[in-house]
Image (cartoon, rainbow, N blue to C red):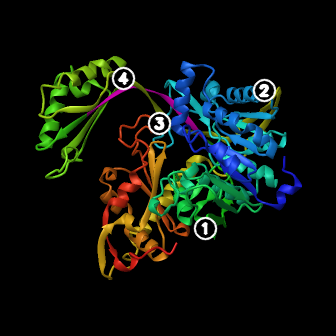
Amino acid sequence: MTGSGEHTRRAVRIANCSGFYGDRLSAAREMVDGGPIDFLTGDWLAELTMLILARNRIREPSGGYARTFVTQMEQVMGDCLERGIKVVSNAGGLSPRGCADAVTEVAERLGLSPVVAYVEGDDLMGRLGELRDAGIDLRHMETGEPLGERQVLTANAYIGGWGIVEALARGADIVVTGRVTDAALTVGPAAWWHGWGRDDFDQLAGSVVAGHVIECGAQATGGNYAFFTEIPGLEHPGFPIAEVFADGSSVITKHPSHGGAVKVGTVTAQLLYEIGSPAYINPDVTARFDTISLSDDAPDRVRISGVRGEPPPSSAKVSVNFSGGWRSSTTLYLTGLDIEAKAALVEGALWSSIPGGRDAFAETDVTLARTDKTDPATNEEASAVLRITVMDKDERKVGRAFSSKVTELALASYPGLYGGGLTAGATLYGVFWPAVIPSPLVYQEVVIGSERTLVESTSYAPDATTEEASDNHEAHESHAAAETADPPEGAEEPTRRVPLGTIFGTRSGDKAGNANLGVWARSDPAYRWLAGYLTVERLKFLLPETSDMEVRRYELPNLRALNFVIVRLLGDGVAASTRQDAQAKSLGEWLRARYADIAVSLLQPPGV
């Protein structure tokens, strides 16, 4: 189950060609043609993607996988085989077998004969009854509520990289998986290449960190970067490559001719994306993000070293999606004077026209966004946005019965009424439900042709409940330390009131129903100021929408960064969220736009 002797003499070059289902279709071709690589990997599976694939499978039973991956394989399969490039992807989604069969059909049509393997074991749909009988009630990781008899659409355990290792050891050229963790797409190839064992925790942790950096494609090469004006060629950035060494250290880079840039800043930003506590848990290892060291190795080459690993938990995370019901939304624009009164009028008229009013629906959400300006120079500058969403188990309530009542107000309400989206029907939405089960109940099965090989899970650490309690303890300790810290550096110096984004970067995203918000500085003095200034209370003041929510704060001084987890900001997850930004992608940019009094001495061009 190890790579050849040659492999141990150099780093393995693992190239990414997809960060999500719908990413740049030409990326696989670009990465194969751009320079030497050993592996081509791609991440297709977000939590929302599993729900999308479930809906696709309902419409087409033979679906359930990412068809764009098959298209990419048609483009590059021949060159990959000729050059010895192996392919590893989680594009199998809900149907690894279906995806592998589709890839095999493409190969036969092209006259090629790759060894195609697929990895199963993550899909728990057929085992839900068995788990219930064993007393495993799939309690929600945040609320503790049992799953109960909800109408489950998908249930997948997050599995690690050892199934990939086994497939490669058996000669696979292309490995298709289901819901492996994003980082496992790097862990598996690196562990096979270097011959690591399951208890080589530091090496495994290093590959998890490298995998986390490249998993989101061009985000590591300048995409969505806070200081994007510093990135050349961002119109078409290249995708990242991780050169992973035998000791688990790595260099993040890109093909020299491709756009974008790899800098300590771009790598830091991606490290802060969608994380929780510094103990970053994966099925194969717990990677300590508070041990990561970053340094410039050369232009467009950032070295990651010093990563320490700890045993993985004894519980495996499970991603469950179930049908939440139906919803309908309408967007109305309010222009000019008396915005609040106009909003109150149309909302009152709408609810009074519906039997039972607002209480007729299981859930409603009304948001008035004051985007209007005083003395506006354009029609758009004079406009505010009113968004009304209704949700219910009964499709009839939130379909035309709702939209028709909105339409009837078109000539009978406030002056200047017009809509940007009068919905004509209801849409089905799903609810994401994160849970855990004991790791020994999760296995992986590698399939090549008619041969099947069972790969058992590994677990060492306390269960997930203990881990979560530990995370909360770290968050509270970090919070308390910040509250009693000395005044921010430069507090007695002359200050200037500027946006926080003048010197601080951010990266934010979704973690189930939670949101994460990472903030980093580009100098040691700026980080010391940030750590003293940006407490939980200060964050809630700057982002008032979070004021009544639980916020966990973690310090990562090695990255000059803070990470905040805002619990339940997204409600029941991306698919069910009624927020305009359901994935919290813009949360960090909102924070960067808030003003603070910052010492003038810190407002100097960054040294890195």
In the displayed structure, 328 sits above or below 256; it is above
Q: CA distance from mark 2 to mark 4?
A: 43 Å
Residue 59, percent from left and from top: 54, 19
**Can you identify the residue that label 1 sits on?**
294
Q: CA distance from mark 3 to mark 1?
A: 40 Å
* Image quarter of residue 50: top right
Kindly identify the residue that appears in the image at 80 percent across and 38 percent down: 172
Tell me the mark number nearer the camera, choosing from 3 and 2.
2
Q: Dot 4: within a 10 Å radius of its alpha carbon, few (fewer than 14), some, or many (20 or more) residues? A: many
Where residue 426 is drawn, which disc sits there? Answer: 4
Residue 265, percent from left and from top: 53, 64
Tell me the mark number nearer the camera, choosing from 2 and 4.
2
Highlighted range, magenta: 317-331
Q: Dot 2: within a 10 Å radius of its alpha carbon, few (fewer than 14), some, or many (20 or more) residues? A: few
Is residue 127 in view? yes
**Can you identify the residue that label 3 sits on?**
145
Q: Dot 1: within a 10 Å radius of its alpha carbon, few (fewer than 14), some, or many (20 or more) residues? A: many
Mark 2: which amino acid? Glu
Q: Is residue 518 magenta?
A: no
Determine whether the residue tagged by mark 2 lies in a helix, strand or loop. Answer: helix
**Can you identify the residue that label 2 sits on?**
108
